[in-house]
Amino acid sequence: MAPFAGWEMPILYSGIKEEHLHVRSSAGLFDVSHMGDLLVRGDGAYGLMRHALSNDIALAKEGKAIYSHILDREGRTIDDTIVYNLGGSYLLVPNASTKDRVLEWLRSHADDAEVLDLSSEMACLALQGPRAEEAMRPLLDLSGLKRFRVTPASLPLPAANLPRELDDGGEGLRCLIARTGYTGEDGFEVMLPWDSAPALWDALLGTDGVYPAGLGARDTLRLEKGMLLSGTDFDGGQTPLQTGPPWVVKFNRPFIGREALEEQSREGGYPVLAGLVMEGKGIPRSGYPVLHRGEEVGAVTSGTMSPMLERGIALAYLPHDLAEEGGALEISIRGRGHPARVKTPPFV
């Protein structure tokens, strides 16, 4: 366990590598209740979402979700988030360390919308891996729920009440289930009353093939797929043009930060986040310098030993001309350069 943003976080249960490989081959269960839960509702909810998100909420019809960045007026990423369209209201799941800032930012731009903080009332359990659907089947058949879709559900388990703003009045354990996740595998994120979470945790861990997994494995899993980590791969000083992915910004309507991004795009010359794979031994870590012909040209933001590739992988900000696929660089590890190649994620 380790403290983070006011929470005690489960880092590992049996071991990071073991949990990582089990998620890739079977199914792992994560407690990610530290994530925020912000509900935007009211007549102006749709307008606020179109104005505050870099991606276009118009692409998310009822029951769908989008991944987006929330930007300041200089186009810098405050946070990244998944936004669920619940049918006229929208549930955002920001990171724990930025939740309060996102809440304040949204409220400061909400003319005819209400932004509620339900974070202390809700938990989230993430079941991830190729056997996730099978593991959920004793509780609920989710074979018809497509990727990046969300649905209200009732599970045959002891129940507390969802926050009234989300409660559909069903029987059993009322929850929201989304086919989303942060591992690059198939899986589900179940958002439910915090005091009902232990019942679901116990039920899922009683299913054959499901192991508990901690935040250590969650980090190595997301890095293998090139997913961003708030506070590590961006810290409020970068724009989505730098971090990517390219589709996270839709310029088809006005939004906060659009003018700054357009100016940055015209000027060019900004560093971009790129993937690196070690050519030989060596494990890249956050802060390690990236070298080109002996000169420092960037620094690792996220780095680890990939359990699937059994070699080091990393993300780093690099000059545009050095971020091309296959480019040869070095990562300085304890003062010595180790060969690496640029590789566009996902790494596996």
Image (cartoon, rainbow, N blue to C red):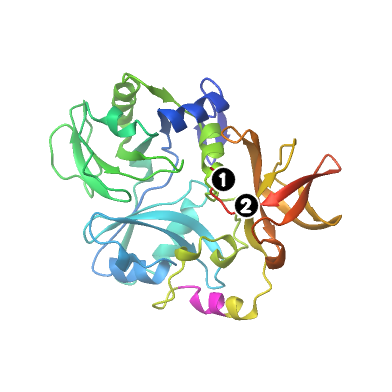
Residue span colored magenta = 256-262
Question: Would you name the residue on which mark 1 appears?
Answer: 347
Judged by its main secondary structure, the magenta piece is helix
Q: Residue at x 56, y 51 (%)?
A: 345
Q: Are marks 1 and 2 in contact (CB under 8 Å)?
A: yes
Residue situated in front as seen by the camera: 123 or 309? 309
Identify residue type, mark 1: Phe
Q: Residue at x 43, y 37 (%)?
A: 32
Identify residue type, mark 2: Lys
Q: CA distance from mark 1 to mark 2?
A: 7 Å
**How many residues crowd mark 2 within 10 Å: few (<14), some (14–19), many (20+)?**
many
Residue situated in front as seen by the camera: 239 or 105? 239
Q: Position of residue 326 (x, y in %)?
A: 67, 55
Residue situated in front as seen by the camera: 205 or 103? 205
Q: Secondary structure at mark 2?
A: loop
Question: Would you name the residue on which mark 2 appears?
Answer: 343
Residue situated in front as seen by the camera: 117 or 1? 1
Q: Secondary structure at mark 1?
A: loop
Of all residues, the one furthest to the front in this rendering is: 326
The correct choice, above or below, for 89 with respect to 185 in the image is: below
